[in-house]
Image (cartoon, helix red, strand yellow):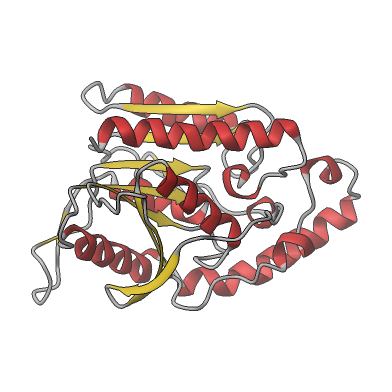
């Protein structure tokens, strides 16, 4: 039986980072897309970002995409929510930093949980797998057919982390007679603190190189669940994989950590480096 891990207020917590994104916006496969290009403009190592619930315009995500481009990856970040991402205001209004969380009263925590339930209760059904996965598969098909593209990796964050895992299942047979016979699937996948995962159902079919970054204080995946995932992946001796744990990091830390905290900044930088090294190895 598969266990689904849901969302909590931590999924909507974090800090807004400073900086000006350097990429450009274009329409790819019918979707508005942020594009960060390496100096060489080479598409040989291509990355597709699947964002968290704050979507493709979230500055933190765009700044991170720019860093991937600086590292030599041609990076796409599409609007898979089609204009329906959650507003950035939720970063400040829903949940404060981990340090502040520890001082919250039970009433405040209950209020946060109620707001999240109300917000996500209407949002998630609109972006369920039956709606979102065809968009993601179709975008990856479009990128794969783009001249100059060689290997494709995917990075998913929070909500998008689960879809990174699904892309690691490899190409799937299409049920749409008007589309390509095989859809989706990438050469390597990196999931950052995924949410809404089903254990073991989402992990059993993984056949492509897989990396995962996970905080030890993530309220959406407790250590027992992480242990189950580690055990499942350990049985896949023919599939390269890694699951790295980041001490005292909460859900969303790779995108929404606090740059003013040395420990949080170190974890964000290490998780970014994890992605660079993983894709350098498996997209080359």
Q: Is residue 205 above or below residue 18?
A: above
> Is 124 placed left or right of 284 in the picture?
right
Residue farthest front in this picture: 39
- Residue at (26% x, 50% y) in the render: 42
Tell me residue 26's x, y (percent). 37, 73
> Is 284 placed left or right of 264 in the picture?
left
Tell me residue 197's x, y (percent). 45, 47
How many numbered callouts? 0
Q: Quadrant of the N terminus?
A: top left
Q: Front-most of 38 and 112?
A: 38
Q: Is residue 263 above or below residue 119?
A: above
Tell me residue 39's x, y (percent). 36, 50
> Is 220 placed left or right of 241 in the picture?
right
Q: Front-most of 68 and 226?
A: 68
Q: Quadrant of the C terminus?
A: top left
Q: Is residue 217 above or below residue 202?
A: above
> Is 109 placed left or right of 149 in the picture?
right
Q: Front-most of 84 and 219?
A: 84
- Residue at (28% x, 67% y) in the render: 134
């Amino acid at each position: 039986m598969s266990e689904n891990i849901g969302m909590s207020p931590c999924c909507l917590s974090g800090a807004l980072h400073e900086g000006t994104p350097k990429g450009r916006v274009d329409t790819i496969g019918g979707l508005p897309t942020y594009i960060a290009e390496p100096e060489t403009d080479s598409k040989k190592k291509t990355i597709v970002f699947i964002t968290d619930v704050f979507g493709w315009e979230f500055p933190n995500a765009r700044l991170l995409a720019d860093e991937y481009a600086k590292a030599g990856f041609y990076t796409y970040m599409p609007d898979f929510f089609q204009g329906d991402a959650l507003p950035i205001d939720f970063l400040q209004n829903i949940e404060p930093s981990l340090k502040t969380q520890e001082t919250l009263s039970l009433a405040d925590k209950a209020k946060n949980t109620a707001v999240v339930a109300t917000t996500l209760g209407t949002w998630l059904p609109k972006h369920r797998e039956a709606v979102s996965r065809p968009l993601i598969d179709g975008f990856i098909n479009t990128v794969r057919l783009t001249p100059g593209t060689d290997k494709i990796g995917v990075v998913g964050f929070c909500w998008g982390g689960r879809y990174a895992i699904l892309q690691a299942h490899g190409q799937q047979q299409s049920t749409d007679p008007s589309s390509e016979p095989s859809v989706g699937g990438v050469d390597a996948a990196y999931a950052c603190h995924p949410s809404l995962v089903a254990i073991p159902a989402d992990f059993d079919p993984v056949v492509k190189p897989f990396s995962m970054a996970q905080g030890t204080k993530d309220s959406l995946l407790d250590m027992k669940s992480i242990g189950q995932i580690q055990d499942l992946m350990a049985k896949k001796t023919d599939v390269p994989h890694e699951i790295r744990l980041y001490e005292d990091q909460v859900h969303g830390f790779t995108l929404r950590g606090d740059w003013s905290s040395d420990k949080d900044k170190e974890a964000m930088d290490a998780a970014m480096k994890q992605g660079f090294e993983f894709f350098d190895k498996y997209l080359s």
